[in-house]
């Protein structure tokens, strides 16, 4: 009788172990697939944001260059070009040196 009870317990425990193992395995596979999907979505978002930032930076730099060239052309009507470029170079150098010193 004890051996039959033990065999019965072995069968039940083996069945339960197999059931929980398959549930855990399917749950783990589902979690891995969900994580992979989220990672791929995040990488595509990162790529889109990098391209968006590159375009914004390009437009910003072209706008700054247009403002500087426009100011130089406007001031060149009243002052010699050499003085304008000299003052501009000094101002930019001072700004860059000040920022480097503050870091």
Image (cartoon, grey):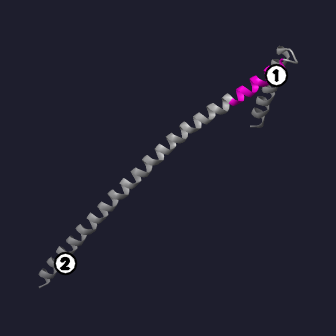
Q: Quadrant of the N terminus?
A: bottom left
Relative to residue 71, is residue 57 depicted above or below?
below
Could you tell me residue 82's position as x and y percent?
83, 14
| Residue extent of the magenta highlight | 63-76
- Residue at disc 1, secondary structure: helix
Upstream in sequence: badge 2 or badge 1:
2
Magenta stretch, main secondary structure class: helix
In-front residue for pair 48/42: 48
Residue receiving disc 2: 9
**Which residue is the site of mark 1?**
74
26 left or right, relative to 75:
left
Looking at the figure, which quarter contains the C terminus?
Answer: top right
Q: Quadrant of residue 83?
A: top right
Under tag 2, what secondary structure?
Answer: helix
Q: Residue at x 37, y 58 (%)?
A: 31
Disc 2/disc 1 C-alpha distance (Å):
95 Å
* Residue 75 sits inside the magenta stretch: yes
Q: Residues within 10 Å of mark 1 (few under 14, many from 20)?
A: few
The answer to which of 57 and 40 lies nearer the viewer is 57
Mark closer to the observer (2, 1): 1
């Amino acid at each position: 009788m004890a051996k039959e009870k033990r065999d019965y317990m072995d069968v039940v425990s083996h069945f339960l172990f197999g059931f929980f193992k398959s549930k855990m395995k399917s749950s783990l596979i589902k979690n891995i697939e969900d994580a992979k999907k989220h990672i791929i979505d995040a990488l595509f978002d990162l790529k889109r944001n990098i391209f968006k930032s590159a375009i914004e930076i390009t437009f910003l730099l072209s706008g700054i260059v247009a403002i500087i060239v426009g100011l130089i052309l406007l001031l060149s009507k009243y002052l010699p070009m050499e003085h304008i470029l000299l003052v501009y170079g000094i101002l930019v150098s001072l700004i860059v040196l000040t920022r480097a010193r503050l870091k």
